[in-house]
Image (spheres, rainbow, N blue to C red):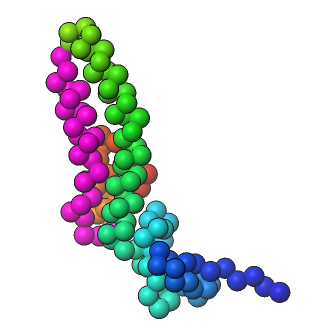
Amino acid sequence: MPVTTYIVDRDGNQIDASTATVPASRDFRGAWVLSGSVITEDLDGAKAIFADKIREARTPLLAALDTDFMKAQETGATTTQIVADKQALRDAPTAGDSATTIAELKAAWPACCGTSPYA
């Protein structure tokens, strides 16, 4: 007996995978929305996933900058660049806010967060 694979969207709607038109990329799988037999990516949902990925990427970077900041203070070195770098990382989750398409969103990955997972 053949096994049927179903795709379930974020709202719990499901479709037989063999009959669905799906996005080429699974980057924003959590933002998939089913409309008939076509699955699309909800931009607002994709933006939330994008911001979460940025937060994940920036966590170790902020920790390293915190250490650099403390070392600079101990030695009396300037902290100006460290403070600016930390602020850029704090602002990074909003990088995709103005995107109007999934392609624009993927291209909005901030350089301060390292290599884009969407490259």
Q: Over which residues does the magenta segment extend?
A: 78-102
Q: Which residue is drawn at 25% across and 54% down?
A: 94
Horizontally, residue 10 falls left or right of residue 95, namely right
**Location of residue 33 with respect to 107 vertically, above or below:** below
Name the residue at 29% across, 51% down.
93
| Magenta span dominant secondary structure | helix
* Front one among 97 and 12: 12
Check the image and report above or below for 78 versus 57: above
Q: Where is residue 22 in the image (x, y as percent from the top left)?
A: 50, 78
Q: Can residue 119 be seen in this view?
A: no
Examine the rendered structure and indicate whether residue 22 appears above or below residue 84. Answer: below
* Residue 86 part of the magenta segment: yes
Question: In which image quadrant can residue 105 be found?
Answer: bottom left
Residue 88 x %, y %: 23, 40
Question: Where residue 48 appears, x then y in whole percent?
Answer: 35, 61
Quadrant position of the N terminus in the picture: bottom right
**Going by the picture, which residue comes out furthest to the bottom?**
36
Report whether residue 72 is seen: yes
Number of numbered markers = 0
- Identify the residue at image location x=37%, y=68%: 45
